[in-house]
Image (cartoon, rainbow, N blue to C red):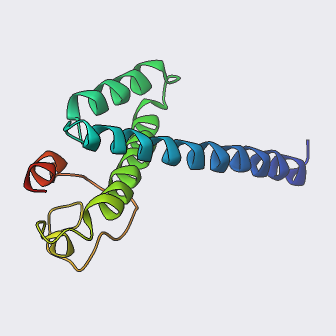
Amino acid sequence: MDLQELRNEINDIDSQLQELFNKRMQISFKVAEYKIANNMPVFQSKRENEILDHVTESSPKGLESASRVFFQNIMDISKCRQYQEFFADSDKIEYKKLDLTGHKKSRCTGYHRLIFTYSLQADIQRL
């Protein structure tokens, strides 16, 4: 296989990843809507840790950490988008002063390696 064939294969995989990512984001919004409608916490650290542990355990040797970070990033992006969608317009939440690291900023920015430290459960209770 030459370099261009390898790149084409990566491009095909990237297209599949994009399609799956989009689908995952749509479903995660539905999950958040369900939780809000049923007075459940949107962010559930136990569930997230179960997913990350499974990803780590099922990854090939040498890719455990990278796989965990990859899925953590996906979940962080999802949480950020859910926060923007469901809580950004609420007067009861000081959303515009929070980003996902807990530092004061104008909005949720920088989807690269986000760390979600602010529990959405507290936000739901305030609504």
Q: Is residue 102 above or below residue 117?
A: below
Residue 120, position in %: x, y? Answer: 18, 50
Q: Quadrant of residue 34?
A: top left
Residue 3, position in %: x, y? Answer: 86, 52
Look at 38% across and 45% down and name the residue there: 75
Q: Name the image quarter holding the N terminus.
A: top right
> Of residues 80 and 29, which is closer to you in this image?
29
User: In the shown orientation, is residue 77 left or right of residue 117?
Assistant: right
Q: Which residue appears farthest toward the front when viewing the image? A: 37
Look at 35% across and 30% down and name the residue there: 52
Q: Name the image quarter holding the C terminus.
A: bottom left
User: In the shown orientation, is residue 27 left or right of residue 12?
Assistant: left
Q: Is residue 85 above or below residue 78?
A: below
Look at 8% across and 55% down and name the residue there: 126
Circle count: 0
Q: Quadrant of residue 51?
A: top left
User: In the shown orientation, is residue 108 left or right of residue 22?
Assistant: left
Residue 33, position in %: x, y? Answer: 35, 45
> Of residues 103 and 3, which is closer to you in this image?
103
Residue 10, position in %: x, y? Answer: 75, 47
> Of residues 59 and 76, which is closer to you in this image?
76
Look at 27% across and 68% down and name the residue there: 88
